[in-house]
Image (cartoon, helix red, strand yellow):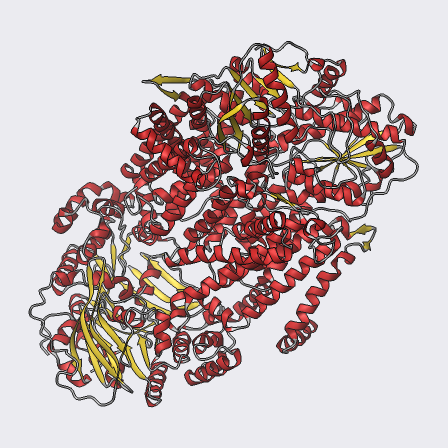
Amino acid sequence: MGKTLKSSTSNRRRFLKATGASVAALTLAGCASDDAGNGGSDSGGDSGGDSGGDSGGDTGTTTGTPEQSVDEVIIGSNHPLSGSLAATGVGMSNAIKLAAMRKNEEGGIESLDGAEVTVIEGDNQGAQELGGQVSEELLSEGAHVLTGCYSSPVTTAATQVAERQGVPFVISIAAADNILQGRDFNYVYRPQPPARRLASDYADLVPTVIRDGGGTIDTAGLFYINNSYGQAIRDSLREFLPEQNVEIVEETAIEFGASNANTQVSRLRSADPDTIIATTYVAGGVLLAQALQDQDYRPPYLTASASATFTDDDAVSDIGEFANGVLDNNYALNPTVDKTAEVRSQFLDNYDQEFSASVGMAYTAAEVIIQAVEEAGSVEPDDINEALKGLRYEDHISAMGAIEFDDQGENINALGPVNQVQDLSVRVVYPEEYAEAEPQV
Amino acid sequence: MGHLVTSVAPLPLQGGGLGRFIDPFVQFLTDITNLEPVLLQLLAFGLLLGGVYALTALGLTMIFGVMDVINFAHGVFLVVGMYSVWLVSEMAGISPFLGIPIAAAVLFVLGVVVHVLTVEPIIEAPQQNQLIATLGVLFIIQSAIEIVFTPDPQQVELSLGSIQVGGVFIPLGQFYALVIALGTMLAVRAFLNRTDLGRKIRGTADNRDGARYVGINVRRINYLTFGIGAALAGVAGGSIALFQRFDPFTGETYLINAFVIVILGGLGSFPGAFVGGLIVGMIQVFGGYYLPGTTAQVLIFLLFIGTLLVKPEGLFGGAEA
Amino acid sequence: MSADETNAPDADAESADVPDADAPRSDSPDADIDRDGEQILSVEGVGKRFSGLQALDDVDMTVNRGEIIGLIGPNGAGKTTLFNCISGAFPPTSGTVRLDGEVISGLPAHKIARAGLARTFQITRPLEELTVVENAMVGAHIHTRRRSEAREIAMENLEFVGLADKAEEEAGELTVGAQKRLELARAISTRPEILLLDEIMAGLTPSESKQMLDLFRQLRERGTSLLIIEHDMKAIMNISDYVKVLDQGKGIAFGAPETVVEDDRVIEAYIGGFDVDA
Amino acid sequence: MSAIESVRDRYRTFDEQRYAPLVKGVALFGLLAALPVIIEIDVAGMELAALLSLKVLILTVIYAYTAQSWNIMSGYTGQFSFGHAAFFGIGAYATQKLLVDFAVNPWVGMLVAGVLAAGYGLVIGALSFRFKLQGHYFALATLAFAELLRFVVTNMSELRGANGYFKPFPRDYGAEYGLVAFQFQNDLPYYYLIVGFLLVVTLVSWVIKNSWVGLYFFAIREDERAAASVGVPSFRYKLIGVAVSAFFTALGGAYWSMYFNTIRPDTVFALFKNVELLLPAVVGGPGTLLGPIVGSFIVTPVSEIARTTFSDINGLDRIIYGAFLVAIVIYSPRGVVSWPSQARALWKRVRGDEEVSE
Amino acid sequence: MLELSGVRAGYDDIEVLHGVDMHVEEGEIVALIGSNGAGKTTTMRTICGILSPSHGEITYRDEAIHSKASHEIVERGIVQVPENRDLFTNMTVIDNLLLGAQTEEAKAHREENLDEMLELFPRLAERKNQRAGTMSGGEQQMLTLARALMGEPDLLILDEPSIGLAPHLVQEVFDVIEDIHAQGMTVLMVEQNVQQTLKLADRGYVMENGRISMTADGDQLLEDEGVVEAYLGV
């Protein structure tokens, strides 16, 4: 394994994975390996995983105060590494390790004389009880800055700890709007567009794409997963679509873990809207596609908002031909910069997992952290925090403008661009500045 | 959160107030009077879904009925069945259909092992202890699968598509599952009614002391029953794998509905499980079509509670299996 | 399992086959017997059907204050069923039961207990994980909500039945004989006016039985009436003022012990329904 | 040997004193109060904190509290509830709904929530007991009543559907951080608050146990018919048991919603929440006063230690945890608190058998 | 054939049998009588392996069987008609009978025996496809007896076979027992119907408080004042 194990752990039971992000680690495959790996699996990415009766944590409440002689910068990664959210959680945590690895390859943190970036991982199992606990563990292990957690309730608990202890927390993914909004947080940041932003981007962008291509989109039918994430997008779409003169004529929900979407498609079919908007995890979208084909139905425009399915290469190839032409808006990798392809191939080499949009977003969060440390030239939490406040980070691989945070910690330029499945691969098609292909309407 | 329901143009089936409870029924009645073709389609979907549900309940009803044990590990048994079929077809390249009997065999062995190690020692203990023991088994098997096969979802490579009969679409994957469910039910019924072993199982379920008096080895019947119940879960899981992606946690959603079906149909009753499955399937399909969100599941639980209260022996309770 | 309890319904499956035309009402309680004292319990035309099977059929009987009445009959005659109907374990399907003139049939068991009728069970039902004294205290709490007072009442009664030294033991650990006495102590801790005892002497050693009979007499002296189901004929004939005989769910005889044992129908019912040429 | 016996004798003498429960209670809660300090102590270069952090302690005491509440109904009256998440969720939701939508102080909201939960408990109890549901059927019915709420709440926009509630700031309901607001800026007060909750429910439990109510509860658990035959109104007392248990469980849910900031149907009404709420009592010893507390101090830390020790293989901890559950119910169905007396009985039997065997 | 020596047994912690000694010889009808609660049924259950004795020995044809499971005891040819019948009430008469044949030997003759039973008990033949639970008490008792006979026992144990039956049915049951015995079956029976039982029995044991208090020939016991007294108290 990589060379670094934090020295401060020596007198304690080792309970967190410390992963050396050195070049040597490049040759090693990640722990989770499977060809079916993908982002936003059919697990409840945003739901509080109701995993069984376990809980608790390990360490004291003391904040790991960084030593003065800085030879490493420690990022604490707080993600679900086991349990029903782990399929994506493991990939996200790996992406963070990759970001550290790449930085170290470049010679580490310049402003800290080449200090290495180390990632330590904690497994929150997708359980709300463990969110704060794992944050504390990571901090007591010496983490200088935190990231996580995929599930919103877990993130809520995790960020609370960071805020109280005055340590910056850059959210990798957590869609719920209220994690930041109105919370008065001073140490928490989110590069990713939250649910409401994604829905408003859908309303702004997708109808434009369709109408620019000469199509008509006056009516829409929603197909959403009936959990917080699905309902949040639904509620926001209800708000924003009418502003773009799209009327929602049908709404139909699918239960988490449902075995098919037959009924829902029957309902959409009898409403026959101009577009179906899917908001689901991977499994839900696959069921939708399956049921649509089984009932030989496809609306003029099959679209998705913040759906994991149509940005997931494996899911798209599982669905096959039928997926072609689907328009989806979601946070995405920026195909117009070379770095994206480079990072993707490195990730595939190292972890044998798909570099999905979710995983890419976690990668970006890690880069934001690294960049902030670089600018701070310090591992003092408050220094990093100041750097984050003033950060303007352009050299990232997500399809959005420079990452800058507002007072609440939201990324001002967060964006969910429009992707389209073309020839069974996912391409960004709009806005033009990030587009790798023309939308086909 | 001010942008909730109010700002949305009223949908036929949405909105607050009492309307959301009444409108769906009005709509339903209107559709019936108009003989909407969609009703036939929904009926078909309900039948298909019901078949799948019935299949998931067969093993549970057997174990519950014969041994009076609530097996919380049943859901994860389904998952083992799914992975078995997947492994067989991915690794050995055998048709997933042939994987189903293999899944049954694997589960039979697993069932016997689980029974001998965890259930048998406490078969006479308070019922909640068995419940907690099988819950422990659930955690163990689920996490073992997660460790071995990763939490990533898997899929059996099989595109079955659908056929159309008189304007009604029949997705083939689910159709096969329905056929397997019917076939399994008939086979198990024949096994229980026609064979000596089956008769012994029924006898033991009926009167454990009586079984002892006539010289049935009740201990053996117990682990065979648990094994067969698990094997049925294997068949069910294997059939579901034909048309659904799955991960180590897929079983949980089926588990609760399987309990509902077992109670609806009556403990140990196979026709009961089938009818119970159909009822739950129909409610989910028609409820899913007419009611907002996933309100249909509320109806299912109300029906479940009602059955428990008024007719705890179930629709087919007391009748022969 | 108790024969009486499990087979009560079956027992009378046959009664449907048996013509009852020739069963004269010789048992109407007060037909030709003069009894002293005020009536405490009266059972009037009580019947009980279990899903089509007539377990009790039009049974009449009375118990006066301070009396000991024996209730006998072959297994499956319906004795325990009658106890259950009287004590409210289940309501009779027909007829009325009065306690001190008040109708109690149809009331739940706990109300009947509170009205002054206590019972014991054929198969003892100790509250196993409670201590002996706590068992008796459950009964005593009818009269007081204070633990200390209930404890006093309970201890008195434990002393009465001779279990005081085992007061702090778990009831489940007692021997059968001790459990029987505990049942009695628990029942009399409610200070009942009438006590229904269901085979409380079964399983006791001869000396225990003798002690038990003494207890019955003392209870009577205190003014408690007793209605006793018992298989030990010697004991029952010995202690009862009057004996009521049930067979096939019907009352077939009532009277002083000496007269009842002479009754042909009783002997027939008892010894096997045929050539008793004695 | 004799030393042990003399200690035992002395303990017995102590045990018989009237003040014994008080002393024991003070000792137990004194220990709980001191725990946050104790875990910071360095033992041989290893802080206890490496095993038990304050957050784990809080969680442990929360589950000790809810298990103690569950115990009043299921341990004492013997009506095994598998659906206490219903009361827990009602507690969380009612408190937050009142707080967020009507700015009702959480202390007030919590009490309202408790009453609501007790009401729901009465409905469940009245129906189930009236229809004489027992054993598995009762357990499944309570589970259904809990799952029902999960789906109802998920589909009710009035309760914010699946998105749930987010605890507002104290200023939003005219308070400042502190006891009145039910909000603190660090964990320590939260810990003492839940210890206080535990103290209250344990006291209530103790009072019940030592009054006629408790005796009636136990009588119902042991044999309902025998109890009824000596005047125990079992239906009414079972309902009392459910209502009290539901009330206190709801307060636990309210605490949860304040401590963890956000609630959703799939967190507070989760299927496995039902298990988490009762597990400590079953492990520790159902029907005992100490069982739920001891049980929680086993279950929660064990799962935590399993999680942190076997972090190299994600999920291994759940295997250990599952095996632990199986082992507990097989080898110690009456709970950990029965170990001392079981050991004594075993010792007696070993010695006794020598005497008896001819 | 069957011998119990010093058998102690009971339920949980409560000992009901405090040392029972008795034996049954090939071809006999032996009656066990005694008041309720004396331990008769417990004795029967212990012989058949439903309960296991804490002390003492039970040997059957010179083989110790007291630690065998109930099905192993049935395999050796001891079948019981239990006191509360324990029929498979949700199953048909035929199913009940077929379940009676568990040993290899009994299975081999199952069909013939079935025919024989239906002949012997014509009321069962009439109701052969009816569920056992729907039959009257007398029919159920016949069925229990027939079910036991399907097991081709060498030793038939009857626990209160006439319980709760109307007199004419009691007679029928006793006739059947006499018939069976005439064909060479060994019978051990518990009966409350003392007169009739003792008339039938070769020998009798009187049980009191978990011990055998008296043993003699059936006729002797029948004339014994003590026995009648124990039952009628006069």
In the rendered image, the vertical position of residue B307 relative to residue A101, given as above or below: below
Visible residue check, residue D142: yes
Residue D335 seen anywhere in this rendered image of the structure: no
**Quadrant housing residue B145:** top right
User: In the image, is D111 to the left or to the right of A114?
Assistant: left
Q: Where in the figure is residue D293, as x and y percent of width and height?
A: 63, 59
- Image quarter where the C terminus of chain C lies is bottom left
Q: Is residue D22 left or right of residue D226?
A: right
Residue at image coords 25%, 87%: C38
Comparing E183 with E207, the one in front is: E207
Quarter-of-image position of residue B279 = top left
**How many numbered marks, from 0 up?**
0
**Residue B89 percent location from the top left of the image:** 50, 21
Identify the residue shown where x is 15% and y is 86%: C33
Q: Kindly indicate the quadrant of the structure image that contains residue C197.
A: bottom left
- Residue C55's spot in the image, x, y percent? 21, 65
Decide which of D319, A272 is in the foreground and name it: A272
Say which of A6 and D130 sits in front.
D130
**Farthest left residue in view:** C22
Q: In the picture, which quadrant includes the N terminus of chain C? A: bottom left
Residue D263: x and y, percent?
61, 44
Give the left or right position of residue B103, taking residue E182 as reference.
right
**Vertical side of D261 occupied by A96: above or below:** above
Position of D118 relative to A162 (above/below)? below
The answer to whether A158 is drawn above or below residue C144 in the figure is above
